[in-house]
Image: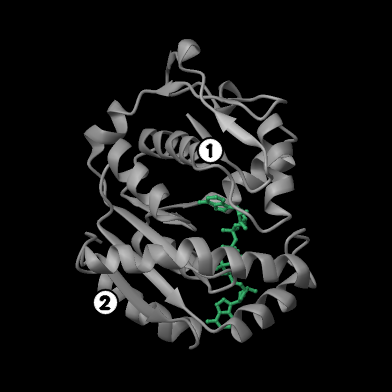
Amino acid sequence: MQRKLATNCSISFWPPTRKKISNDIQIKKIIFFANNTINRVKIDLAPLKAAKLPVFFIVGGPGSGKGTQCDQIVKKYGLTHLSSGDLLRAEVQAKTKIGTECKAIMDKGGLVPLEVVLDLVKIAMLEAVKKGSKGFLIDGYPREVKQGDQFEAEIQPAALVIYFEASNETLVKRLLERGKSSGRSDDNIDTIKLRLDTFFNSTRPVVDHYSKKNKLVKLSAERSVDAIFADVCVQLDKHVKK
Ligand code: AP5
């Protein structure tokens, strides 16, 4: 199976070496080869599926406030917050092979191969289940329709997709402000423009996709954090036991 990457390299799976691994085996086992080939391993999802915990996808443009709202949700509902961006940045910081390959893509505002992100998310979810998670906020995911479909096929359907909508002007302003202190290598105007392009080309279709499935809640992210959160709570109260 071959896919074209944002970096113009090709990616392929190598099924003959797929192995079943236990929950404790970390992402290091997913080898990102120097020739841009991913060797995926089978992750045992049985404990995750048995837990039957609600999953919420949190979607929005860069700087729309996904992380900010997730922090509030965690405080009130005790859900497990998994940000795909944070999981990737942890790999970058740890200077793993995956991290090095992904940094180049992230610095260009592109999308990391969905298999890499999905496996990172799966492993983090399994870890959280072991610690008694009540459910998941998957922040910054899905970034493209295929990501969501693959997650739902391999793990479980999402209970709800919350989409934070804001204008480009607002997003750029927030990210440039955050960039003064965030230390994030993608919080600069050139990469922000590329992130916005990626959002409109790849992620915006996710909104229509889940809207057609009646799973989408669209909230204006142009308001105060508290006003947005009040609307988030109205939605989550329908799905989460406090
Ligand atoms: P990621 O880390 O997910 O970045 P992002 O989507 O660009 O979102 P941010 O984290 O920058 O913003 P946010 O929406 O969380 O806003 P925040 O709350 O911080 O992804 C980074 C990269 O990783 C991607 O470009 C891609 O390369 C890769 N990647 C990630 N996930 C991937 C996936 N699934 N597949 C493939 N690749 C993936 O708020 C921003 C600022 O605004 C803050 O300063 C905050 O204080 C402020 N703020 C928040 N809310 C408000 C408000 N209501 N009013 C005023 N200010 C506010």
Find residue 219 and report its image quarter: bottom left
Q: Nearer the viewer, residue 196 or 88?
A: 196
User: Does residue 155 appear anywhere in the picture?
Assistant: no
Residue at coordinates 52% horizontally, 69% vertically from top-left? 200
Which numbered mark, 1 or 2, is in the foreground of this view? 1
Instruction: Establish if 53 lies above or below 126.
Output: below
Find residue 165 and report its image quarter: bottom left
Q: Give the image location of residue 173, x and y in percent.
A: 68, 83
Residue at coordinates 46% horizontally, 40% vertically from top-left? 118
Q: Give the image location of residue 208, x and y in percent.
A: 33, 68
Real-space CA distance between mark 1 and mark 2, rounded to the nearest whole angstrom: 40 Å
Residue at coordinates 72% horizontally, 25% vertically from top-left? 34
Number of residues whose C-alpha sits closer than 10 Å to that of mark 1, classed few (under 14), some (14–19) or many (20 or more): few
Find residue 187 and report its image quarter: bottom right
Q: Nearer the viewer, residue 229 or 120?
A: 120
Q: Give the image location of residue 114, x and y in percent.
A: 50, 43
Instruction: Establish if 152 lies above or below 186.
Output: above
Q: Give the image location of residue 169, x and y in percent.
A: 63, 86
- Across the whole image, how many numbered discs are drawn on residues? 2
Residue type, mark 1 in image:
Arg
List the residue tagged with mark 2. Answer: 234
Quadrant where the image shows the C terminus:
bottom left
The reply, left or right, for residue 227 in relation to residue 34 is: left
Please state the quadrant of the image where ligand 1 appears: bottom right
Residue type, mark 2 in image:
Val
Q: Look at the numbered disc 2 and give the secondary structure of its residue.
A: helix
List the residue tagged with mark 1. Answer: 3
